């Protein structure tokens, strides 16, 4: 294990730079030179670790998933006893993350896939794995909440988990369009109200 004071290696520096620069400027506008300057590494170091910018894009998506996955796994919303309370607390946690400027709280994956879904299949697939994988972490709580409230419906835990991600990603797009977090917070509040209505106990 590296010591706590160990400096990040060049590859990690480049990945961390990608997370910040791409969220601020978009994938297409981000250049290898800019990533190297932000990371404080040489262009030779970049191409030692990544054959191309697109390969870096895939790695950045995976790095984002690992970094944010650890953050969500340790988040306090898991502490609630009731599965619906956990789900609602997850949504509240997403709202609480709307801090700082737009590039600081919006999603790297959403930015990447919007620009590359047609032109770079490997990045699109990496983004799909990231969004779908994160959505899957909600499915068990959704299923338990459905059982606990006697819900039987054509919709599934998987479809609702993905819908929640669609709302969140849409909220980020609106935040970019409006230039601030307020509209995104409003969208998340609507999502909370929708979930509360959806999980009302089934009438006998």
Image: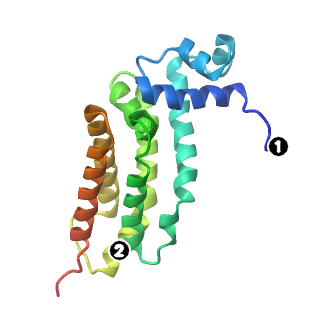
Task: Report which residue position mark 1 lands on.
Answer: 3
Vertical position of residue 56 compared to residue 185: above or below:
above
Vertical position of residue 202 compared to residue 118: above or below:
below
Question: Toward the viewer: 168 or 135?
Answer: 168
Q: Which mark is residue 145?
A: 2
Name which residue lies at 41% across and 36% down.
101
Q: By what rule are the colours in the image chosen?
A: rainbow
Q: Which mark is residue 68?
A: none
x and y percentages locating residue 166 in the rendered image: 30, 47
Instruction: Kindly state the secondary structure of the residue where label 1 is placed.
Output: loop
Where, by quadrant of the figure, is residue 160 drawn? bottom left
Q: Is residue 71 left or right of residue 183?
A: right
Q: Is residue 15 left or right of residue 146?
A: right
x and y percentages locating residue 123 in the rendered image: 45, 29
Whether residue 70 can be seen here: yes
In the image, farthest residue toward the bottom = 204
Whether residue 122 can be seen here: no
Nearer the observer, disc 1 or disc 2? 1
Among the two numbered marks 1 and 2 on one chain, the one whose residue lies closer to the N terminus: 1
Instruction: Kindly state the secondary structure of the residue where label 2 is placed.
Output: helix
Name which residue lies at 47% across and 78% down.
81
């Amino acid at each position: 294990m590296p010591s706590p004071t160990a400096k990040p290696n060049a590859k990690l520096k480049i990945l961390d730079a990608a997370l910040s620069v791409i969220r601020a400027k978009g994938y297409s506008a981000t250049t290898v030179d800019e990533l190297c300057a932000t990371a404080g590494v040489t262009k030779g170091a970049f191409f030692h670790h990544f054959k191309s910018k697109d390969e870096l894009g895939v790695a950045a998506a995976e790095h984002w998933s690992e970094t944010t996955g650890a953050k969500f796994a340790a988040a306090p919303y898991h502490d609630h006893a009731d599965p619906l309370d956990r789900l609602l607390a997850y949504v509240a946690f997403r709202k609480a993350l709307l801090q700082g400027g737009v590039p600081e709280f919006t999603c790297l994956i959403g930015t990447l896939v919007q620009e590359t879904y047609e032109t770079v299949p490997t990045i699109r697939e990496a983004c799909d794995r990231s969004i779908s994988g994160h959505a899957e972490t909600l499915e068990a709580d959704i299923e338990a909440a459905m059982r606990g409230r006697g819900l039987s419906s054509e919709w599934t835990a998987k479809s609702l988990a993905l819908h929640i991600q669609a709302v969140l990603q849409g909220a980020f797009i609106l935040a970019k369009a409006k230039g601030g977090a307020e509209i995104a917070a409003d969208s998340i509040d609507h999502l909370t109200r929708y979930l509360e209505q959806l999980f009302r106990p089934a009438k006998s």
